Image (spheres, helix red, strand yellow):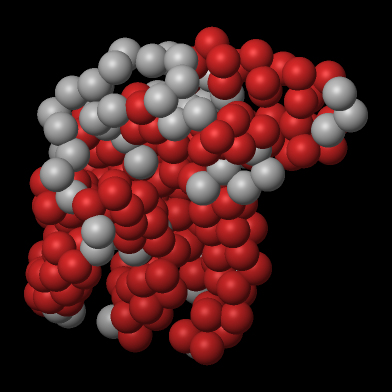
Amino acid sequence: MRLRSLVLWDIRFQARYGFYFLYAVLTAIYVAILSAVPESWREKAAAILIFSDPASMGLFFMGAIVLLEKSQRTPWALAVSPVRAAEYIAAKVVSLSAISLVVAAVLTAAAGVDAGVGTGVNAGDYGGVGAGAYGSVDSCMVLLGTVLSSAVFTLLGIIIATRISSLNQFILWTVPVELVCFVPAILHLFRVGSPLADSMAANPRGPVQICMQTYTQTCTSGSSSAADAVAWLRYYPASVCMEMVSGQVPSPIGILMVMALIGVLFVAAKYCVLNMWGRMGGGKL
């Protein structure tokens, strides 16, 4: 199978250029950071670390990977081989997601995240605030969120990497992507501007019904802009991925938004890869 061979080739390529060694060192550093963070902040710190590095490593390293492949004239060989652009992209997504998954699992364990959902609160019913806000979080949801985030960032990295000719150019292109993806997700993680978050802070031991009542009253009493911002962030794909990485259960609509984004990015990445191969003198019929 071509896809299996491509995945194994990517894994060997990443091992040869020190990806695994680098992330072994980074993981040890992140575990040390988490051990120094107060326990009350550990879950959020782990979510930020996972989302901003292992989950998004495809965005950060894809430029170097493609430039290294170009230096070895690998795209020229792929352009005239039976390998399809979709297989090339899928291999990149799978191989990088595997590294992200392992690192995320280690950081999740280091943060002391439980294996199951603690309270069973449905995030879709309470403005995206799920079990992570009220009790233990779901490590399976963390890992699923890591895989989906990795797929999104890897596809974005491929789209950018196929259009650049130097690493400096790649870094410049990734800056706006990082701002668009990271800033809303981190704001959503800390519930910035959320009436529900303010209600929970004022009633830390109060029932969920009181929080929802306060939220409804606030939204209907003139704070429409804040409510609209919270609603928008709730379905924003980066925010949905952050919710999952933090162990919360997102709304079904949010998950559909992420899957739709992955589909659109995959099609765009395929188009960009075919264009890159065409510029190198090869193309797929």
Q: Horizontally, is 233 left or right of 116 in the view?
A: right
Front residue of this view, candidates 215 and 124: 215
Q: Residue 222, percent across and down?
A: 89, 29
| One can see residue 70 in this view | no
- The N terminus - image quarter: top left
User: Which residue is located at x 17 percent, y 73 percent?
Assistant: 29
Q: Is residue 227 above or below residue 108?
A: above
x and y percent of residue 28 in the render? 11, 70
Q: How many labels sit on residues?
A: 0
Q: Nearer the viewer, residue 43 or 95?
A: 43
Q: Determine if residue 241 is in view.
A: yes
Residue 69 occupies quadrant:
bottom left
Report the front residue among 109 and 167: 109
The residue lying furthest to the right in this view is: 222
Residue sitting at x 44%, y 43% = 242
Q: Is residue 187 left or right of residue 137?
A: right
Which residue corresponds to the image point at 47% horizontal and 85% vertical from the top-left?
167
Residue occupying the point 40% across, 61% down: 52
Residue 267: horizontal and vertical position, in percent? 56, 41
Q: Position of residue 2 (x, y in %)?
A: 21, 44
Note whether 240 is above or below 179 in the view shown: above
In this rendering, is residue 63 above or below 266? below
275 vs 125, nearest the viewer: 125
* Residue 192 as seen in the image, left or right of residue 22: right
Q: Is residue 17 above or below residue 263?
A: below
